[in-house]
């Protein structure tokens, strides 16, 4: 792997980035007034993803300490993109209430994207995974990890299941990706059902052999 220059951290961030962080803080202050209309959640999701994209770029450039904002206490796990939908999202480590407020997150206990088994990434249906319902069988999902390795998955199906009995096998043979969000997409409250989209790595020799 080629050597990369360190990103330079907080001191080297652009003025625009700093302004964005200030705006993010102001949105938080105004959150009480905006929560009722849902604008706060969506604004927070969009602004945080902008900063996460910059943090991920710094990680690719070799800055292993890059953070989206100085007080962030989580790390980035990958970037997923869907060329057909022109979608790009930064995935965080560990699906908790905190991380899911800022972006899709890798579910604890599942392998890193591209590792053997089934990686599970979850996100909210009204923000970062609102586009999940638009994916179709055969669509390609690109996954890039902070080490600069790209992998391509192909969607092979979707289903609705109770999260406690979701049928996902983290130790499944081959290399798989499952994207999950709450269902129905237009529900006002969160229930036990999840919309799960299944995809498989298309350039993995193990997957190719098992499908022949």
Image (cartoon, rainbow, N blue to C red):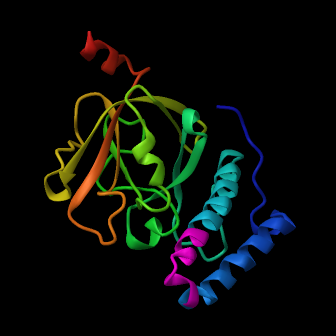
Q: Nearer the viewer, residue 176 or 145?
A: 176
Report the residue that reaches farthest toward the right: 15
Task: Name the residue rendered at 66%, 74% in the picture.
Answer: 70
Task: Name the residue rendered at 46%, 57% in the picture.
Answer: 104
Task: Name the residue rendered at 75%, 52% in the picture.
Answer: 6
Say whether residue 163 is left or right of residue 90: left
Q: Quadrant of residue 115?
A: top left
Q: Quadrant of the N terminus?
A: top right
Q: Nearer the viewer, residue 37 or 32?
A: 37
Say whether residue 68 is left or right of residue 150: right
Asked if 154 appears above or below 47 in the picture, the reply is: above
Q: Quadrant of residue 97?
A: bottom left
Magenta segment: does it hold 41? yes
Task: Name the residue rendered at 83%, 66% in the picture.
Answer: 16
Report the residue that reaches farthest toward the left: 165
Pinpoint residue 5: horizontal percent, then vertical percent: 77, 46
Report the residue that reaches farthest toward the top: 212
Residue range highlighted in magenta: 33-44
Do we see residue 63 in this rendering? Answer: no
Pinpoint residue 71: horizontal percent, then vertical percent: 61, 77
Secondary structure of the magenta portion, mostly? helix
Q: Quadrant of residue 87?
A: top right
Say whether residue 17 is left or right of residue 35: right
Q: In which quarter of the image is the C terminus?
A: top left
Magenta segment: does it hold 21? no
Asked if 95 appears above or below 61 in the picture, the reply is: below
Do we see residue 118 in this rendering? Answer: yes
Asked if 86 appears above or below 156 in the picture, the reply is: below
Q: How many discs appear?
A: 0
């Amino acid at each position: 792997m080629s050597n990369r220059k360190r990103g330079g951290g907080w001191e080297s961030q652009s003025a625009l980035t700093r302004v964005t962080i200030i705006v993010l803080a102001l949105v938080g202050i105004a959150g009480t007034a905006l929560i009722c209309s849902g604008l706060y959640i969506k604004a927070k999701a969009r602004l945080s993803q902008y900063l996460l994209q910059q943090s991920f770029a710094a990680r690719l450039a070799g800055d292993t300490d890059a953070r989206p904002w100085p007080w962030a206490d989580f790390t980035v796990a990958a970037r997923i993109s869907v060329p057909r939908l022109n979608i790009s999202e930064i995935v965080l480590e560990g699906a908790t209430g905190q991380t899911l407020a800022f972006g899709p997150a890798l579910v604890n206990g599942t392998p890193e994207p591209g590792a053997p088994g089934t990686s599970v990434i979850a996100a909210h249906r009204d923000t970062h995974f609102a586009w999940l319902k638009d994916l179709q069988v055969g669509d390609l999902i690109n996954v890039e990890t902070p080490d600069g390795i790209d992998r391509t998955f192909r969607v092979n199906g979707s289903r609705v299941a109770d999260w406690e009995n979701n049928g996902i096998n983290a130790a499944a043979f081959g290399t798989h990706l499952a994207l999950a969000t709450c269902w129905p997409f237009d529900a006002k409250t969160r229930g036990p059902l999840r919309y799960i989209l299944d995809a498989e790595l298309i350039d993995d020799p193990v997957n190719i052999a098992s499908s022949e």
